[in-house]
Image (cartoon, rainbow, N blue to C red):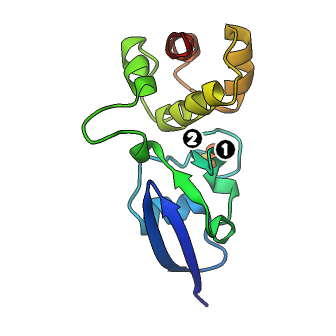
Amino acid sequence: ELLPLQVEINGTVQKLSIEPRVTLLDLLREQLGLTGTKKGCDHGQCGACTVHLDGQRINACLTLALTTEGSQVTTIEGLTKGDTLHPMQEAFIKHDGLQCGYCTPGQIMSAVACIREGHADSPDEVREYMSGNICRCGAYANIVNAIMDVKQ
Ligand code: FES
């Protein structure tokens, strides 16, 4: 049975019909084509699916889409303004904060939240906040540098 869902995604109100078991991650990727948000583990372990829900970071794979009713969701696609990258995206490029890039959207969504939530006062604090975002390439040092650069 399909149930109605109204949610604002990257500034656009979406009126959808979805199955109750669908996660926000699958809604974004499969129904809305927003494939910037990645599916790594699908179990809350890797952070590749990190998005913002009403400004707070969440794991989209652990969030049932229906629970976002009336909320605002921002994905990596929503960070850019036209052709202009978000300062955090620019900083990841500048500091080589990515290698294969699979974890990068989630890393960047967490990084933006890290500063917004006031957890970027030191590299150690950043590392702690970012510890839920796993990078198999091991770009961690450069990611921390990128965040500290934007924080300044
Ligand atoms: Fe959601 Fe790994 S896909 S935390």
Q: Name the amino acid type tagged 2.
A: Ala
- Where's the N terminus, which quadrant? bottom right
- Picture coordinates of residue 20, whole percent (x, y): 66, 78
C-beta proximity under 8 Å, tags 2 and 1: no
Q: Which residue is mark 1?
A: 56
- Picture coordinates of residue 69, whole percent (x, y): 63, 70
- Picture coordinates of residue 151, whole percent (x, y): 56, 15
Q: Label 1 crowding class (10 Å Cα cut-off): few <14, some 14-19, many 20+?
A: some
Q: Name the amino acid type tagged 1.
A: Gln
Dot 2 beta carbon under 8 Å from ligand 1: yes
**SS state under label 1:** strand
- Please report the residue visible at 64 percent of the width from the left and 64 percent of the height from the top: 68
- Where's the C terminus, which quadrant? top right
The tag on residue 79 is none
* Residue 33 located left or right of residue 70: left
Q: In this orientation, does residue 134 appear?
A: no
